Amino acid sequence: MRRPMVPRVPTWPSCDAPPALAANEIHVWRADVRQCEPYLPRLRMLLDTAEKARAARFVAEPPRQQFTVARAMLRHLLGQYLTRPPGNFRFAFGPSGKPCLCEPATTVKFNVSHSGNEVLLAFARNREVGVDVEHLHQLQARDAVAERFYTLPEAARIQALPLADGERAFFHHWVRKEAFVKAVGKGIASGLSAEVEVLDRADEPPPAPRLVREPHEGKDWKLFSFELAPEYLGALSAAEEDWTPLFLAWEPGSAL
């Protein structure tokens, strides 16, 4: 059976409330931090005491805003999916820092990523999920990082490309590896990323999803790549292959 295609640059229709989360769907929500700025004072009110304290510890304003938007967005959307007030959630963190709900008990799984002005959240039912977004930028030690975290063939292909093409290829690999290891519940430094090939080519993601096998447990994980904008790349990974993504744009005003 042919696997469904995902647009290289998906559309993100605005949505005030999430649709029902089907077992064979993963909802990917996007927010632009700049568009959320007018709502920040009220979005902060959705955070709990520990989250407000953590936000206050950021020295620079951009990461403080990133964190505030991501946590407010997470609490608001979880409240919508689970029909509970946004403040009635308690989170726990796995060994590699992956967040999960410890109260209430639920079949909804989620993951969070932010970079630059972009925030991404992914929600799934009864399956682990990982999402990543990266802002393209120049890397001083690109080849050294690739040698540490990529397979030998991946690193060799990136190093063989011209500088500009190599940087884009590096980040195509990076977002896919991040999404995969986050779905599995490990960090990028766990060593797993250097064991698993995530692209068939170094210069661009495949137009169809790729199925990746976790080498230690033998479980299959599906990977999608997409572009949010010319300077932002994203990826999504989740267990098994019987699911499709639904892309949605979060309206911060709907949380107030």
Image: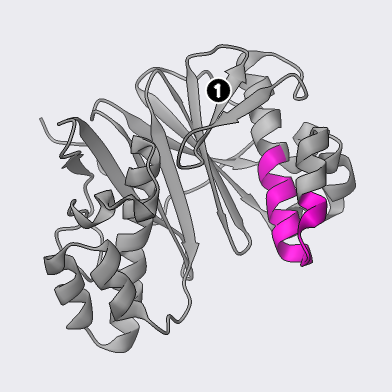
**Prevailing secondary structure of the magenta residues:** helix
User: Looking at the rendering, which quadrant does residue 80 occupy?
Assistant: top right
**Quick one: which residue is furthest to the bottom in this view?**
162
- Label 1, residues with CA under 10 Å away: few <14, some 14-19, many ≥20: few
Question: Where residue 211 sits: x, y (%)?
Answer: 18, 40
Q: Is residue 86 above or below residue 251?
A: above
User: Which residue is label 1 attached to?
Assistant: 19
Amino acid, disc 1: Pro
In the image, residue 230 sits, relative to residue 13, either above or below, namely below
| Residue 39 forms part of the magenta stretch | no
Q: Quadrant of the N terminus?
A: top left
Give the magenta-colored segment's residue range.
55-71
- Can you tell which quarter of the image residue 226 is in? bottom left
198 lies above or below 249: below
Is residue 70 on the magenta stretch? Answer: yes
In-image side of 141 versus 43 (left or right): left
Taking the spot 43% from the left edge, 50% from the top edge, the residue there is 10
Left or right for 182, reference 14: left
Q: Residue at x 77, y 33 (%)?
A: 255
Q: Residue furthest right?
A: 41
The image position of residue 42, as x and y in percent, is 88, 41
Judged left or right of residue 163, residue 80 is right
The image quadrant of residue 121 is: top right
The residue sitting at 37% across, 53% down in the picture is 188
The spot of residue 50 in percent (x, y) is 78, 37
Picture residue at 39% right of the left edge, 37% below the top: 185
Relative to 155, does residue 106 appear above or below in the rendering? Answer: above
Q: Nearer the viewer, residue 9 or 172?
A: 172
